[in-house]
Amino acid sequence: MTLTSETVPVQGAPADALRKALTSQIRPSRPNPLTAVRVSAWRTMRKMKHYGVAVVFDVTLMPIIFLLTFTYLFGGAFAGSTKEYLQYFLPGVLVQTVVMPTVYTGTSLNMDITRGIYDRFRTLPFWQPATIVGNLLGDVVRYVLALTTTMSVGLALGFRPDGGAGGVLAAMLLLLLFAVSVSWIFAALGVVAKAPETVSGTSMLVMFPLVFTSNIFVEPDTMPGWMEAIVDVNPVSAAATAARGLVHGNASGADIGWVLLACGVITVVFAPLTMYLYRAKSRD
Amino acid sequence: MSSQSTLAIETSGLVKNFGETRAVDGVDLAIPQGVVYGVLGPNGAGKTTTIRMLSTLLTPDGGTARVLGHDVVKEAEAVRSRVSLTGQFASIDEDLTATENLTLLARLLGFSRAQAAERSEELLEAFELTDAAGRQSKTFSGGMRRRLDIAASLVITPDLLFLDEPTTGLDPRSRGQVWDSVRAMVALGTTILLTTQYLDEADQLADRIAVIDRGKVIAEGTTGELKSSVGTGALHVRLVKAEARPEASQLLAQALAAPVFQESDPFALSVRTDETERVARALAELARSEIAVSDFAFGRPSLDEVFLALTGHPAEDSTATQEDAA
């Protein structure tokens, strides 16, 4: 054999460092589930930080385009004046703002699974669902950024919340809860999909009817009965109604109750389903 | 540390099917601790599937496997706590920096924040990534990514490390760095099972090798054993002058007591032999008769030849690394 390679015996600093690194005998006990969730959420937030302003741009571009076109194109026709329409429409856009980026939870979960880091996670001793839960919670930062941006643009355009700052805050909190619940749907999709593109592609099939067959844009009074029935049961309508009520200071307990119920039902169905699918996946 | 008498890996009749395909078809292995063990085979031979079963990522469909004395199915947790896997495709988060990747894993393993920071720094230094610590790993070269991936497998020093094709697609320099780390790790007591389709890699690193083809182990032993199972070694001589070949041929035939082959290259001669001392004397004879030799090589057959002899087909994708093989 005359095989040669460029290997030279390692010496000096790297060899010593390697020796030091390899003789470490730290064997900590497994982290508790809460720590694991916190660490996973930290990871999601670090990733967002690396993306920088692109994150905000990504999630608020669409809602702002909707806000501007609907208000100035159809506002007068829908509600008599653009200013009047904005008071009705803005809380709806807030719902759209938080619901649209819930897809990210699914795509980033799917990316973990299809790109290999999932294999690494699976061999670690922590509570496995922590990666999913952490991902969901880390995404709350995204929703907060999106909500604040859309709200600021709304205020600049002349939106005036009768419920004051307290009402706006309450509406945002409710919508955050709603977004986290909806993101379980996409988390489930993220686990079963073969590729991240499948998640974002399929998501439009869910997102489009969910957002448009709602009362985000117009009051359902003028719709045909069957459509009105669909709009009424759509949880997005419930969220929009409650958000509208909270920002204008006239939400009823029932309005809020419906949203909480929707959040509960979605979470109870999709959270365990996601966990089940995730575990099933690990058994190949 | 468990006693050295416990085998690092012991499998019997290991089987894995994917639909109709039998990816692993009755693999038996007995690998002692403290060695580098090479699993050599072409693409699709079942190397990765075997390694994934041994690291508990896949459940076997048949047979048994014990890793460091623990059953991979019934005692998966115990296996996981002592082994680590560096897969064929980097299992790191490309959006995160090198430091963030290592910190994340350390925290998920139960390190405190301070411990995690310290450990990341230690590992980055060990794998010469300190300068790139704050860069997103998607900007890394293939070699750096691979090193980070190996570092990520060592957050807790494993007793057994699986390396699945650790140098596939790397440039020679990065390859050398990975080899150095492997040698250092085994010197410090970690058992390493590596899969490779590069014959010279197995030759350079592994104490023992299993040759695997179509899901079956078709040969097992030290590189030396495998080579001698195929045949004897050979002396190859290349002369400065082609005219000197008949005389050289006669001298070599006498000195080695073996037939001399005139190769198609008019300057080259070869003799099949295993006798090192006679070879040395034969070369001295040539010098004494003032026959100038431009180069010579003496060795047993290359693993390339071994592979060909065992499987009946050459190892795929290995041509690029084999241009100097005898």
Image (cartoon, coloured by chain):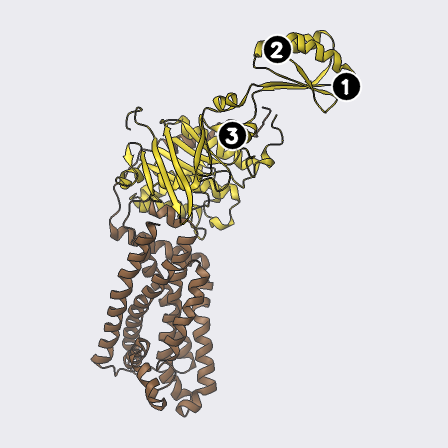
Chain colours: A brown, B yellow
Q: Locate residue A41 relative to residue B41 in the image: left or right.
A: left
First in sequence: mark 2 vs mark 3: 2
Give the crowd class for mark 1: few <14, some 14-19, many >=20 residues within 10 Å.
few
CA gap between label 2 and label 3 equals 31 Å
Please state which of residues A220 and B208 is positioned toward the viewer in this rendering.
B208
Q: Is residue A218 above or below residue A264?
A: below
Q: Quadrant of the C terminus of chain B?
A: top right
The outermost residue toward the right is: B243
The answer to whether any part of residue A40 appears in the image is yes
Please state which of residues B130 and B3 is positioned toward the viewer in this rendering.
B3
First in sequence: mark 1 vs mark 3: 1
Q: Nearer the viewer, mark 2 or mark 1?
A: 1
Q: Locate residue B87 relative to residue A248 in the image: left or right.
A: right
- Identified by mark 3, the residue type is Leu
Give the residue pinned by disc 1. Answer: B242
Q: Tell me where residue A46 appears, x and y as whole percent.
A: 39, 55
- Identified by mark 1, the residue type is Ala
Q: Tell me where residue B249 appears, x and y as whole percent.
A: 71, 13
Q: Mark 3 lies on which chain?
A: B
Q: Quadrant of residue B31?
A: top left
Residue B310: image tag? 3
Please state which of residues A280 and A242 is positioned toward the viewer in this rendering.
A280
Q: Which chain carries label 1?
A: B
The answer to whether any part of residue A14 appears in the image is no
Give the residue pinned by disc 2. Answer: B280
CA gap between label 2 and label 1 equals 22 Å
Q: Which chain carries label 2?
A: B
Q: Is residue B230 above or below residue A54?
A: above
Q: In which quarter of the image is the N terminus of chain B?
A: top left
